[in-house]
Structure formats: C-alpha cells, structure tokens
Amino acid sequence: MKKDFNENLKKEHYENADNNSKLIINLRNINHTMHSLYEGRGSQKRILIILLENENITQQELTEKLGIKPGSASEVIAKLEKSNLIERTKNILDRRTANITLTDEGRAMAEDAKKQRETRHEEMFSALSEEDKAVLLSLLEKINSDWGKFEAEEREHHHHMGHPHHKGHQHGAHHPNEKHHKHKNNHNNDSDYKKGCDGNCSDCPHPCGRKKQK
C-alpha cells in the first residue's frame, strides 16, 4: 500500500511539473537505471574489457582509464591476477610500474563481457529507431556541451573563492584600484594579507575585518 501511495505521489508530481523539471526527473531516472545495469568503474568486467581493447597496458595507464584511486585499482588487479585472468610483468622503461596483459582465460572472459555489454546497449535503445537515436544523440551532445561550459565556470568560481584577495579577477591579474591599494607580496592567508596591506581598503574585496578609512 505504502509503495503504491508513493508511486501515485511521484506520478502526480511529474504530471504537475513543468518541462524543465520533467527533463531533470527523466535524466535522473535514466542515470539511476544505468548505474544498476552498468558495471562499476573499478569492476572486474570493465577492467577485462579495457585490457581487451588496449594490449599490454601499464598498471598506471589502466588506473587512469578507470578513474579510480591507485589503491582501489591495485586491489582489483590483484584479485584478477590471483584468478589467473591477467598477468603482470615489469615495464622495461619504468621499473616502478608493470605491464598488464590478459591470460587466455582472461581474454575469453573479456570477450564474453564485451558481447554482454554490446547486447545490453542494443536492448537499452531498442525502443528507438535509428532516426530517433540520431535526434537524441544530437540533443544530448548539445546539452553536454552547454553543461560542460557551466561546470568549467563553476570550477573557476570556486578557485577564486579559495583565493579571497583575488576574488572577482583572475589570479595574477591587477586589482581595478591597484594604484590605491597595492599588495606588497603574494599572500596565501589572512594574517599575511594584512601584513602586506597598505591600509587603504576602498573597494578591497578581501573580508579581512579592517574598516574603510574615512
């Protein structure tokens, strides 16, 4: 009963939502479904597929492709090696890392995992025609490009927030009222900032607590 009640609430919320909200709801649901269907970033199947597509890759390169911490990657790699699915050999050019290759057993499992992924991809978009897929792809690429710009702006904003005395302008750029308020040195914290301040706080963006001179 409770499940049905919640589902009815979700349905009512969706029907009363505007198009932007409906888009977000659908994207969120799709993201949840993909997480449940897709192998994780550091899963054994994903590692095997990457090794199948990249012959004789180093452990460092594999870790970078996985996008996970080196310690987590080493743990999964060790399990695969113990299961005789991969083998590691010292890299001739860099003795600090190792080359990783598939064993015959590992290659057979990797090929099977790749076929399963391809079949899953076909099933995920089976409701769409090729024309539908082309339209959807075009729209998603357009959104992805626009959101990428927004994400870059957000990173830049947080970077400046981390440097209060450079807030509002790029690191290393001159303050608009530089002739009235010059910093003697490049300071990294509040106490150093005050030491390097000449006392003229007119239009200074730094919240150092000094009162503006009258």
Image: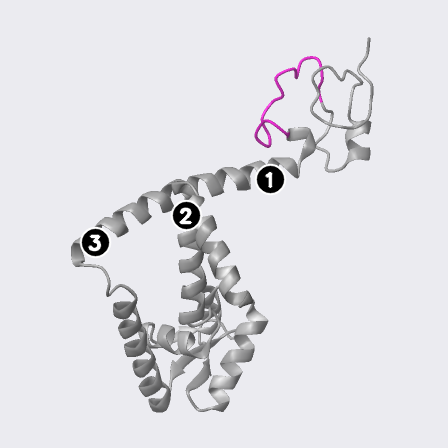
Precedes in sequence: disc 2 or disc 3: 2
Task: Tell me how far mark 2 sits from mark 3, CA to CA.
Answer: 24 Å
Q: Is residue 128 left or right of residue 50?
A: left
- Mark 3 and 1 residues: CB-CB less than 8 Å, in contact? no
- Mark 2 and 1 residues: CB-CB less than 8 Å, in contact? no
Task: Tell me how far mark 2 sits from mark 1, CA to CA.
Answer: 40 Å
Which element is circle 2 on?
helix
Badge 3 is on which residue? 132
Badge 2 is on which residue? 15
Which is closer to the viewer, label 2 or label 3? 2
- Tell me the kind of residue under disc 1: His
Mark 2 nearby-residue class (10 Å; few <14, some 14–19, many ≥20): few
Q: Is residue 38 visible?
A: no
Decide whether residue 121 is among the magenta residues: no
Which is closer to the viewer, label 3 or label 1? 3
What residue is drawn where x is 78% and y is 23%? 197
Instruction: Say which quadrant the C terminus sits in.
Output: top right
- Tell me the kind of residue under disc 2: Glu
What residue is drawn where x is 36% and y is 91%? 105
Badge 1 is on which residue? 159
- Residue 46 appears in which quarter of the rendering? bottom left
Q: Is residue 66 visible?
A: yes
Would you say the magenta stretch is mainly helix, strand or loop?
A: loop
- Tell me the kind of residue under disc 3: Asp
Looking at the image, which is closer to me, 193 or 25?
25
Where is residue 184 drawn, in percent x and y? 74, 25
